[in-house]
Amino acid sequence: MDHRSPSSVPRRTFLETAAAVGAGVLGHQSQVASAFPFAADLLADGLRIAPFRFDVTPPEGHSLCGGWIKPVVAVDDPLEAIGFVLLGAGKPIVICVVDWTGLLNEANLQWRAALAEAAQTTPDRVTVHCVHQHNAPFACLEAQRIVASQGDLPDIINLQFFDDCLDRARQAVLAGLQQARPINQVATGQTRVDRVAANRRILGPTGSVVSQRGSSSRNPEHQRLPEGRIDPNLKTVAFYDGDEKVLACHYYACHPMSYYGDGRVSSDFCGLARKRRQQDEPQCVHLYFNGCGGNIGAGKYNDGSPEMRPVLTQRIYDAIVQSEAALNPQPIRSLRWVTQDIQPPPDRSRWNEAEIMQAISDSRQPVVARNRPAYTVAFLRRCAQQIPITLSGLHINQTSLLHLPSESFVEYQLSAQSHAPERFVACAAYGDGGPWYIPTAAAYPQGGYAVSVAWCAPQIDEVLTNGIRHILGIAAPHS
């Protein structure tokens, strides 16, 4: 696969693929119900599921988290991509989650295209998410081209490794399709997670951010302060073949790092909890999705010591088990896939491509001050090409799986649930990570780290919120 600048032939390929996504979305929008319940695309008879999984562990020496932390020196536990293909509801639907920091812009689109090719569907019926561990790859192909052109910066993503992962993806899907099995029931459950998540943004008396609690902290004040606004619940959606649980998706909103930066690859506490549950139930495939955790971390309860990783793992594992204890399978009576394209508005008042490129070329700056801005430029170029982000939702009976981009703030998840209180709404964020953080409009004047690395203008709030409402079949409010 050619990863040269998208200004040449690969750019046409990229835009043609994006156009195919857009065409698929436009072709599907006419079928979207204006309100619940969504019309059925199928009866339960004939619905099948094909789970797949494959290794995505980076090799020794590979960059982690964009190249500004220590590269791979060892693997504590391998990284995986896990997903499933749904068959029998029109063109196949593919949902996948990856133990990487992020898949941004063209990288996300190429993963969707590869999975679509293998499943014989279209990219608009594929969604790919990351769990967002930091001792893991952070893939943006345009950002990689930018840093490679400098000649003195570490790679963001090794292109051969990236292509190898796409090959494994195709092979895994093809193998999974050979083992597809019927499903005819769905179940949901949720439970409150014990002492993991807390809001990262600590506001002072004037309403501005005065401190970030982060994923870990040894600051007693950070530990003393309340959790703040979070979604405390871990949610599970499971699929059954008769009485046998075939696949379970788990959702929780929190940055998933106990500690990182030591070069030791790990799926960290959320991935380790998922793996432990998988060992409990080898006949059932378990997936873990990070919800809208852009402003959520474990810093209230985590001091960053190695001893805390198994403690946090146990807490997530316990929540998974408890959420599954409430599962009550019901016959699948309706299933519908809904999509909506959005155009995130870049904040060009803050981000100027020429100025950023000049800073990237300044060899006196540390790597983080040069590699990270490459992601900003990549997003600005994406916006100039008007390549949309595709939101999607899988609606099964009274359950909605909502697929959102990037590091969305938890408020988007909470508002999505409030939009459809009669439904069980489970949110997966960290899809297409091009925008980086997606704060709410109210968060921008408050400042803080997340706002400083949000490439979108505050208008993204209205754009994303309206997109979510569309996916959920809720009419936008009149202005």
Image (cartoon, rainbow, N blue to C red):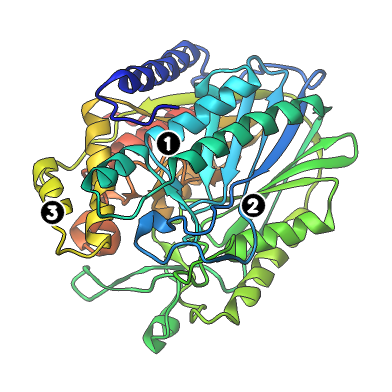
Q: Position of residue 264 (x, y in %)?
A: 54, 67
Q: Position of residue 59 (x, y in %)?
A: 54, 54
| Screen quadrant of the N terminus | top left
Q: Label 3 near label 1: C-beta < 8 Å?
A: no
| Residue position marked by numbered label 1 in the rendering | 107
Left or right, 215 with reference to 344:
right
Q: Amino acid at mark 2?
A: Lys
Q: Say above or below: 337 vs 363.
A: above
| Residue position marked by numbered label 2 in the rendering | 235
Give whichever of discs 1 and 2 has the lower sequence position. 1
Q: Amino acid at mark 3?
A: Ala
Q: Is residue 425 visible?
A: no
Residue extending farthest to the bottom is 220
| Residue position marked by numbered label 3 in the rendering | 359
Give whichever of discs 1 and 3 has the lower sequence position. 1
Q: Say above or below: 28 vs 160.
A: above
Q: Label 2 near label 3: C-beta < 8 Å?
A: no
Where disc 1 sits, the SS reads helix
- Along the viewing direction, whichever of 135 and 308 lies nearer the viewer: 135
Question: At 65% from the left edge and 65% from the top edge, which residue is drawn?
Answer: 316
